[in-house]
Each structure stands twice: as C-alpha cells, then as structure tokens.
Image (cartoon, rainbow, N blue to C red):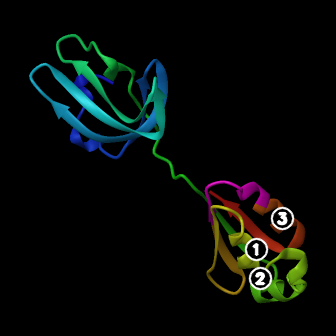
Amino acid sequence: MKTTEVNKKLIGRRCECIFTGLMVTGVIEDTEENEHTIEVKVRFDHPHQWGDDLYNDVWAWGRKIDEFGTLHHLQLLEDKPDFQIMTVVFGEPISRIDRSVFEDVETWGVCSLQGWVNSYESVRFVAIDDHTAIITGEYNMEQVKVWLEKYTSIKSLKTS
C-alpha cells in the first residue's frame, strides 16, 4: 500500500502485513500521520511470538518521501463473511423429521433436528417456517449438508 492511500476509512478492514519477515493477517485498528511518515496499526488475528515476547499488533509504516518502510507490504483482503449460510427447504415438516428421525434419542443424542445441527461447533439452525430452515456456520457445513441429504427429504438446498 502507498502512503497516499492511507485514510481513516481503512479502519476495520482485513489486511495482510509483514511482521518479523512473515506475512500475517489482521484488522486495521488505527492510522497515524506525522510530518515524515504514515502508519497503520494492524491487530493480528492470532498473537505472534518473536523471541520471548508475544505480539498482538504492529504498526506498518511508510516514509512519505520515498515509500520506504513496511507499509508497502500491506495488502487489503477481500471483505467476506466468516460464515456460510445454507437455506434448506425440507420435503416434509420439520416437526415430522423431529418425530421420525429423532424418535430414538439414544442414537442421536438429541430429540430434534435443531438440537442435532446446533450440536456441531459453530453451526446454528433457525426454522423460519414449518418446512424451511436457515443454517449458519463457520465450518462443518459440508458435514451437515451430507448428513441432511442422507437422513432427510430435501426439496431444495442453497448455500452462500
């Protein structure tokens, strides 16, 4: 990134920057400007160790006169959600799936479709009518989709 591209509108954007010779990801938290440099504060997605110290953020900086500094390594990342959305229209009412598939609580460990989906880490199930549900999750969505296709009747399934 060039020093002329830095502004307060960058705050909150995901980026990749250099830290101890490695490209790391994070979120821009702040910008500062003085007579000679422009700086961008990046909060890391995960702390990084250098020597005995653990770092949570870094200031990427660039000299205005010649662009020298670590700022020229900073790249903005595409803004995309950290989760997936699956819209499922079942071929039978969700209440019927609850009574038939989850009749044996011992087998599944839960008594409902919502309970089964919500048992997956980071995945949530919300019924929006008697045949339709919105399922969201950060990961595990492929496993949920495979299970739904195997054990339930599906009219349509759309992911985004």
Taking the image as shown, residue 8 lies to the left or right of residue 123, namely left
Q: CA distance from mark 2 to mark 1?
A: 6 Å
Asked whether residue 140 is drawn in magenta, I would say yes
Query: Residue 116 sits in which quadrant?
Result: bottom right
| Precedes in sequence: disc 1 or disc 3 | 1
Looking at the image, which residue is at 48% across and 25% down? 23
Q: CA distance from mark 1 to mark 3?
A: 10 Å
Q: Residues within 10 Å of mark 1 (few under 14, many from 20)?
A: some
Tell which circle, 2 or 3, labels the residue nearer the N-terminal end.
2
Q: Position of residue 124 (x, y in %)?
A: 63, 69
Count residues near mark 2 (Cα–Cα under 10 Å), then give few for <14, some for 14-19, many for 20+.
many
Q: Secondary structure at mark 3?
A: helix
Q: Nearer the viewer, residue 55 or 21?
A: 55
Read off the magenta span.
Answer: 136-143
The quadrant of the picture occupied by the C terminus is bottom right
Whether pointer 2 and pointer 3 mark residues with C-beta atoms closer than 8 Å, the reply is no
Residue at (67, 62) in percent of width and height = 121
Per the image, the residue denoted by label 1 is 116
Which residue is located at x 9 percent, y 22 percent?
35
- Could you tell me residue 66's position as x and y percent? 22, 10
Quadrant occupied by the N terminus: top left
- Is 98 left or right of 81, judged from the image as shown? right
Label 2 is placed on what type of residue? Ser
Along the line of sight, the residue nearer the viewer: 114 or 119: 119
Q: Which mark is residue 112?
A: 2
Where is mark 3, residue-wise? 147
Q: Please identify the quarter of the rendering in which residue 54 is found.
A: top left
